[in-house]
Amino acid sequence: MATSLQRGAALALAAAALFGLTTPAIARASRGVGPFATAACLYGGAALAAALLRASRRRSGAALTRQSLPWLGGSALFGALLAPSLLAWGITRAGPTPASLTLNLEAVATVLLARLLFSEPIGTRVAFAIASMLAGGTLLALDVAQRSTPELLGVIAVAGATLAWAVDNTLLRGLADNDPLEVVALKGASGGTISLSIAVLRAEGMPQLAQLLALGGCGALGFGVSLQLYLLAQRQIGVARTGSLFALAPFVGAVLSWLLGDRGAGGAAFLGAAAFAFGVWLHVTERHAHPHRHVPIEHEHLHRHDDGHHDHVHEPRVSGAHSHRHRHDAVEHEHEHAPDVHHDHGH
């Protein structure tokens, strides 16, 4: 049976793959379209996809409340307005492959912020994994730099997008226990609306129908479904590990760009891929167990009654995953665990 670390890692890798696959497509579909108009299309597609999925599924987390608004507003500002606008502006000047590889900075910034703001435990194994994945991304970037001449301002803009998304990833920790589809729908709708308003005020180039559909599709998959998976991964393994594994996205984007004809990567790409694969292996095979104490707490999130932490009684009985407000009494025990909502203790 897969551990919570392995389940969370699988979700984070799936989120990264979806996001990475959309980067080269955005570069092609956004030609002639303004950066804020592009951001509006991307997050409009994400919001629409999330709303449709939410209408056909039962809730998979706590409902958003007034206390959620600061987290959601900050996430929309950094993740749905600033980051995609900077990416859209930079990707057309840097090129799809350099832009994809520059996105590797997001993982490093996310891990540092998670450690600084939430004191998430990293440990030697995860530190080696992060270093290995960073080394892989650096090898790829250096290889591309020798073979192409991306516009410096474009690379800087994409780097700014990674920092904005790192802040977004950190803010999303406050929403990890909420229904992910509600988070994506509201974040996308608010960020997309503001982006569209700015695009209209700036008289930016607007997409043709084919571009609108392409960018909307990229948003639905790379910014909608991907964000849903990202939130579920954060719920399982925390901000730092999810952000680190999300470094797969630039590699996926670079590979797709290469397959589509952008031969910006060469021999060092194989060394980079090997380093990255080693980092992923370290993450997936991580084991973490020690005696720890749970303090009394009352909260709401998606849970099951066979996970060793939820033994409260329902009348009538409830089986499977469900969400409602419940209380945990103090307990001390030992078992394998990840830095999830129940295991944010110090080490």
Image: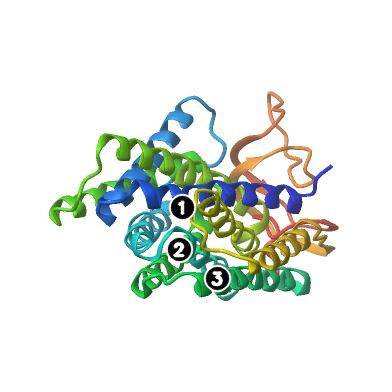
Q: Amino acid at mark 1?
A: Thr
- In three-dimensional space, the C-alpha distance between marks 1 and 3, rounded to whole angstroms, equals 16 Å
| Mark 1 vs 2, N-terminal side | 1
User: Vertically, is 102 above or below 312?
Assistant: below
Q: Amino acid at mark 2?
A: Ala
- Residue position marked by numbered label 1 in the rendering: 23
Residue at image coords 31%, 50%: 38
**Residue 161, image x, y percentages:** 41, 65
- Residue position marked by numbered label 2 in the rendering: 99
Q: Is residue 347 visible?
A: no
Q: Tell me, what colour scheme is on the image?
A: rainbow
Q: Is residue 320 visible?
A: yes
In the image, 243 versus 131, the foreground residue is 131
Residue at image coords 73%, 58%: 338
| Mark 1 vs 3, N-terminal side | 1
Q: Mark 3–mark 2 contact, CB under 8 Å?
A: no
Q: Answer few, some or many: residues within 10 Å of disc 2's Cα (few below 14, many 20 plus, some between 14 and 19).
A: many
Q: Answer few, some or many: residues within 10 Å of disc 3's Cα (few below 14, many 20 plus, some between 14 and 19).
A: many
Q: Amino acid at mark 3?
A: Ala
Label number found at residue 141: 3
285 vs 262, left or right, is right
- In three-dimensional space, the C-alpha distance between marks 3 and 2, rounded to whole angstroms, equals 9 Å
**Residue 138, image x, y percentages:** 59, 73
